[in-house]
Amino acid sequence: MAAPKGRNKIATETKTLKVDDPAPDFTLRAHDGREIALASFHGQSVVLAFFAFAFTNT
């Protein structure tokens, strides 16, 4: 199965996390174009909210 256009992984290639598992480091682009890595918040509480496809033409 090929990944959807613009993506390089599909869900079956990504580890499923369990409650209390540490999140793997990743980098995302912010609304202002900056790249932000989860690792830059080490030692702080972080809430992640993902809205899949909410702001795309997909």
Image (tube, rainbow, N blue to C red):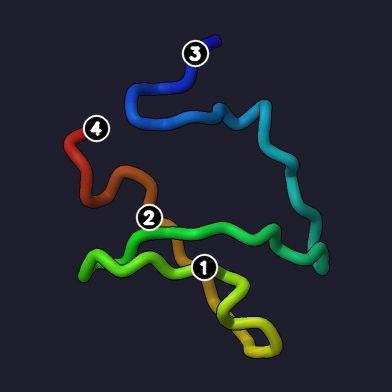
**Residue 51 shown left or right of residue 27 in the figure:** left
Q: Residue at x 24, y 64 (%)?
A: 33
Secondary element at image label 3: loop
Q: Position of residue 52 (x, y in %)?
A: 38, 47
Q: CA distance from mark 1 to mark 3?
A: 26 Å
Which of the two labelled residues, at mark 4 and mark 3, occupies the earlier sequence position? 3
Q: CA distance from mark 4 to mark 2?
A: 12 Å
> Mark 2: which amino acid?
Phe
Secondary element at image label 2: loop
Secondary element at image label 4: loop
Q: Where is the N terminus found, in terms of image quarters?
A: top right
Q: Position of residue 7 (x, y in %)?
A: 42, 31
Relative height, residue 13 to residue 56 (above, below): above
Of discs 4 and 3, which sits in the foreground? 3
Residue 37: mark: 1
Relative height, residue 5 to residue 46 (above, below): above
Which of the two labelled residues, at mark 4 and mark 2, occupies the earlier sequence position? 2
* Residue marked by disc 4: 58
User: Are the residues at dot 4 and dot 2 in contact (C-beta closer than 8 Å)?
Assistant: no
Residue 51: mark: 2
- Residue 56 occupies quadrant: top left
> Mark 4: which amino acid?
Thr
Q: CA distance from mark 4 to mark 3?
A: 16 Å
